[in-house]
């Protein structure tokens, strides 16, 4: 019943912001962001009210200064909604197919995400670098999930190089993020469990004059070293 109540708030709010979103296009990007991010604010709050799911964040100080590339563990739908609550203004790198989802994709389009055709091979990587550089130079963080798909707590997917390549080409720092949202909001699950998602933002990883392989190894090592402890929590 609690999960159903959440979806009863989530779905109408998504439709509302998707329909309203195009009306914000005459505004600057930051003007649109201030308005459209209220969707996130509402749904994170509503998740706490209906399902008792809160969160705490450690390491916010690592986000200070110049915008960079944020590489985050991907366990749940939770992080795709909640990251905006504690990350500076950002754009997501996502599959182009997501832009075709009615309402959700329309709302995303207003915020100029980097929508990649993953079947395009090398061209997709060049698109990521070109558009990623543009967003970074505009002072926006670029958020990616290097595993590409959600993985269950206690497991890991194959870390892909796209974010590391972007960081190496632009010389921007990489900030890794670990969390245990999958414990409380499992992938492909309708039910959400009460508790507190723990998020840890790691120290910046230098990318200038380094190869993408080396950058990615450091990112994966930090994230997975924290996941063992984070994922060990038991649901009430």
Image (tube, rainbow, N blue to C red):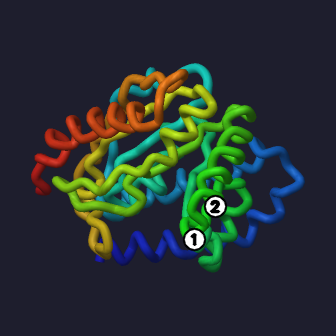
Q: CA distance from mark 2 to mark 1?
A: 8 Å
Residue 165, numbered circle: none
| Closer to the camera in the image, 11 or 152 | 152
Q: Nearer the viewer, mark 2 or mark 1?
A: 2
| Rendered residue at 31%/40% (across/down) | 220
| Rendered residue at 27%/58% (across/down) | 182
Q: Residues within 10 Å of mark 1 (few under 14, many from 20)?
A: some
| Rendered residue at 17%/48% (across/down) | 231
Say which residue label 2 marks.
115
| Closer to the camera in the image, 119 or 234 | 119
Say which residue label 1 marks.
98
| Rendered residue at 57%/51% (across/down) | 92
Can you say which quadrant of the picture contains the C terminus?
bottom left
Is residue 197 found left or right of 46 in the rendered image? left
| Closer to the camera in the image, 41 or 212 | 212
Secondary structure category for the residue under label 1: helix
Secondary structure category for the residue under label 2: strand
Q: Residue 52's image quarter?
A: bottom left
Q: Looking at the picture, how far across and down is residue 128, in whole percent?
A: 63, 50
Q: Cβ–Cβ below 8 Å for labels 2 and 1?
A: yes
The answer to whether 153 is drawn above or below residue 132 in the figure is below
| Closer to the camera in the image, 26 or 215 | 215
Q: Looking at the picture, how far across and down is residue 54, in whole percent?
A: 33, 48
Which badge, 2 or 1, comes first in the chain's sequence?
A: 1
């Amino acid at each position: 019943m609690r999960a159903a109540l959440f979806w009863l708030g989530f779905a109408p709010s998504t439709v509302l912001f998707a329909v309203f979103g195009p009306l914000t296009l005459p505004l600057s990007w930051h003007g649109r962001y201030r308005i459209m991010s209220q969707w996130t604010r509402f749904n994170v709050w509503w998740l706490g009210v209906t399902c008792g799911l809160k969160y705490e964040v450690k390491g916010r100080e690592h986000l200070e200064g110049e915008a960079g590339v944020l590489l985050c563990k991907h366990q749940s739908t939770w992080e795709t909604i909640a990251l905006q609550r504690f990350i500076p203004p950002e754009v997501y790198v996502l599959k182009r197919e997501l832009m075709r989802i009615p309402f959700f994709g329309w709302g995303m389009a207003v915020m100029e995400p980097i929508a990649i055709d993953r079947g395009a091979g090398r061209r997709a990587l060049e698109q990521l670098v070109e558009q990623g550089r543009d967003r970074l130079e505009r002072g926006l963080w670029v958020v990616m999930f290097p595993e590409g798909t959600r993985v269950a707590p206690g497991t890991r997917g194959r870390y892909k190089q796209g974010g590391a390549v972007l960081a190496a080409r632009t010389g921007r720092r990489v900030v890794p993020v670990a969390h245990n949202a999958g414990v409380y909001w499992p992938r492909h699950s309708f039910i959400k469990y009460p508790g507190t998602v723990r998020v840890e933002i790691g120290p910046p990883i230098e990318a200038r004059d380094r190869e993408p392989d080396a950058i990615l190894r450091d990112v994966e090592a930090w994230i997975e070293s924290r996941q063992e402890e984070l994922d060990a929590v038991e649901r009430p």
